[in-house]
Amino acid sequence: MSVAVRVGFTDKVRAHLELLDPVTWISVFPCLAGGAMASGAMQPTLHDYLLLLSIFLLFGPLGTGFSQSVNDYYDLELDRVNEPTRPIPSGRLTEKEAIRNWSFVLVTAISLGVFLGFHVGGVRGIIITSSILSGLVVAYLYSAPPFKLKKNILTSAPAVGFSYSFITWLSANALFSDIRPEVIWLGGLHFFMAIALIILNDFKSAKGDEEGGLKSLTVMIGAKNTFLVSFIIIDVVFSVFAWLAFSWGFTVLMYFIVAALFVNIFIQVPLYRDPKSGVSFMKQAVEDGFGNAIGQSDVQEHNAFLRFQVANNLLFLINLLVAAGMIGVKYM
């Protein structure tokens, strides 16, 4: 049971917002921006700007927020070990208040998703509505028993990749145009990149996962092998991306992607050799440039991953968004 704590109104509101974990909302924004850009059909009108704002709200604060809120509710016992300062284990929110939190967000997300589906209409509207509904279902199954997809890395990582990456690319694209074939490829690349990163993100909860019987890759094969598996996926993603850019006629972009791959490998090698401090040469630069934006951790392997993630995400997302823009120009 949660410990009862006297909390003022402002702190209560802050705790509800923290339960939705605003930092995680950012993860879907590049996918949504890329999907809209690749359509080549968004117009500089108030109507289209409002549509874009709506899809950002739908998959960010509502969709991602629902996922985080449900996860905190069902992970209460794990969070007592891994993250005792979270709203529920710290007693700032009761379990009933947490249920009200994600129930309100769920109803709001479904309502907005259905509205956008009807507003856009046709097959495109069906894609938008079905995407958010399937994303909400997967988000619930990810944390809630008896399914609890997060219990095994073979189901948890694909669930995250599907909900945070693939359907967001499709939905933002469908908001303004028919689905571009290239968007399916870009969404697929982002899907596998998300899988690789969620594998590494499990470092932060390895202790609680092992005690709670969750089969994260770190628990099963150790930190060094976990880095190796993730790096192989990441490097394959960059390689396929380079091939796609070449096949689409984006030769200059292909060179940049190949260069990004080599930079990534340069960072990966010392990190694989020493999972705890292998990228210490990046430590000062990352902390000075990003402060607390990337998060902090008491687990050395997780801190090393956070530093790697900054470099990897910049290399991947910049090239991905450039590709989306070039695709959009092609369809104008």
Image (cartoon, rainbow, N blue to C red):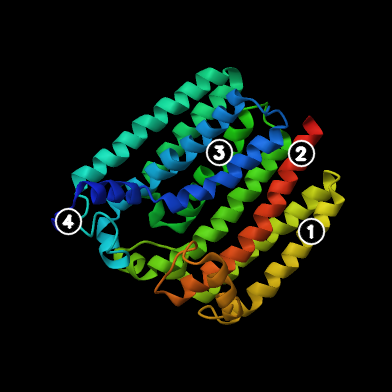
Task: Please name which of the two marks, 1 or 3, marks the residue nearer to the observer.
Answer: 1
In the figure, 233 relative to 299: above or below?
above
Left or right for 297, reference 8: right
The N terminus appears in which quarter of the rendering?
A: bottom left
Residue at left offset 84%, top offset 50%: 246
Query: Separation of disc 3 and disc 2 at Cα?
Result: 18 Å
What separation in Å lies between label 4 and label 2 (alpha carbons)? 51 Å
Real-space CA distance between mark 4 and mark 3, rounded to the nearest whole angstrom: 35 Å
Q: Is residue 34 left or right of residue 151?
A: right
Secondary structure beneath dot 3 equals helix
Give the residue at mark 1.
256
Q: Which residue is mark 2?
A: 327
Q: Amino acid at mark 2?
A: Ile
Badge 1 local density, few (<14 within 10 Å), some, or many (20+)?
some
Does the CB distance between marks 4 and 3 fall below 8 Å? Answer: no
Instruction: Indicate which disc, 1 or 2, sits on the residue closer to the N terminus.
Output: 1
Q: Give the crowd class for mark 4: few <14, some 14-19, many >=20 residues within 10 Å.
A: some
Say which quarter of the image contains residue 288: bottom right
Q: CA distance from mark 1 to mark 3?
A: 26 Å
